[in-house]
Image: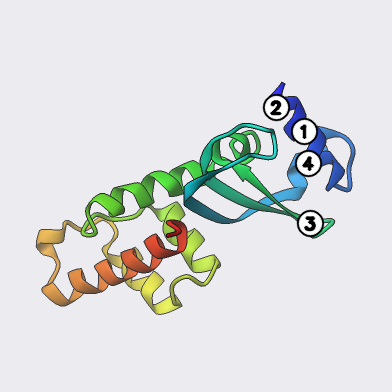
Amino acid sequence: MSEYKLTIELLKSSQSQKWDEAKLEWELIDIEKMKEAQECLCGHYPINEICIIKNNKTNKEERVGNCCVKKFNNKSDKIFRSVARIKKDMEKSVNAETLQFASVNRWISDKEYKFYIDILKKRNSGLPDKQLEWKKIINQKIRSKVIKQ
């Protein structure tokens, strides 16, 4: 039932009226982890992991839950899990998908992106103190963009 409602609502904001085509028009442009629950476009409540999607044909934006967005984009789940990991321990690393998303959305600079890619697979024990501190600063930037107060 809720999946059907999601499809109907997204088709209203899509150019194509065929779901298999319309779902390709939508892209993930932002994510938020909210403290206060919200309702998904499908009607599901409560949701806290919000995905903002944009239709590349109509330029319309919608807010949907992380579970619903998985029906046509699975990147958000990886990003939410990665941010949850650094929320618990700022010395942990984000995954490559999260890093790329942060770079594309200009949450971090090109210099920060290149640095993090270079150290992504290195253990923290092998990083000089300055590099570890820079990694934590970048993690905080990413975390603050996703987790809304």
The residue that mark 3 highlights is 60
Q: Secondary structure at mark 2?
A: helix
Above or below, 40 relative to 140: above
Q: Kindly identify which numbered label has been placed on residue 10.
A: 4
Left or right: 5, with 90 as reference point: right
Give the CA separation, mark 4 to mark 2.
11 Å
Q: Colour scheme in the image? A: rainbow
The residue that mark 1 highlights is 7
- Residue 43 is drawn in which quadrant? top right
The residue that mark 2 highlights is 3
Which image quarter is the C terminus in?
bottom left
Q: Kindly identify which numbered label has been placed on residue 125.
A: none
Q: In the image, what residue type sits under mark 1? A: Thr
Above or below, 136 relative to 148: below
Q: In the image, what residue type sits under mark 4? A: Leu
Q: In the image, what residue type sits under mark 3? A: Lys
Are circles 4 and 2 on residues that touch, CB within 8 Å? no
Are circles 1 and 2 on residues that touch, CB within 8 Å? yes
- Residue 69 is drawn in which quadrant? top right
Where does residue 102 sit, x and y in percent of width and height?
47, 64
- The answer to which of marks 4 and 2 sits earlier in the sequence is 2
Q: Secondary structure at mark 1?
A: helix
Where does residue 106 sit, x and y in percent of width and height?
52, 72
